[in-house]
Amino acid sequence: MTTHVVCSRCGKQRPADEDPLRALSWVADRDSGELRWLCPGCARAHVRDIEGKLPNEYW
């Protein structure tokens, strides 16, 4: 079974045969029980938003 991974910001689709190291650069986020993905480009562009979701205990 192949899972299609699509960036929730730009709609880019991760190729099923993508290099495993590049596949690791995709970011998964669970919001209200829904799994969402960010491609590497969107993850870099929105890193401050991602860090803002971290609990205070992390810092």
Image (tube, helix red, strand yellow):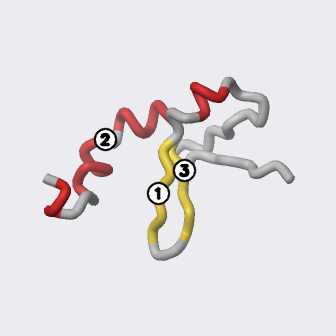
Q: Which residue is mark 1?
A: 29
As drawn, 20 above or below 52: above
Q: CA distance from mark 1 to mark 3?
A: 6 Å
What amino acid is found at the position of numbered circle 3 in the picture?
Answer: Trp
Residue drawn at (25%, 44%) of the image: 48
Q: How many marks?
A: 3
Give the SS element for disc 2: helix
What is the secondary structure assignment of the residue under circle 3? strand
Residue beneath label 2, please? 47
Q: CA distance from mark 3 to mark 2?
A: 13 Å
- Residue 22: name its quadrant: top right
* Residue 4, image x, y percentages: 74, 49
For the residues bearing labels 2 and 1, Cβ distance under 8 angstroms: no
Residue 24 position in % (x across, y down): 55, 35
Asked if the residues shown at circle 1 and circle 3 are in contact, with their CB atoms under 8 angstroms apart, the answer is yes
Q: Which mark is residue 37?
A: 3
Residue furthest to the right: 1
Amino acid at dot 2 = Val
The residue at 23%/55% (across/down) is: 52
Label 1: how many residues lie within 10 Å, few (<14), some (14-19) or many (20+)?
A: few
24 is higher (above) or lower (below) than 34? above
> In the rendered structure, which disc, 2 or 1, sits on the residue that comes first in sequence?
1
8 relative position to 4: left or right: left
Residue furthest to the front in view is 57
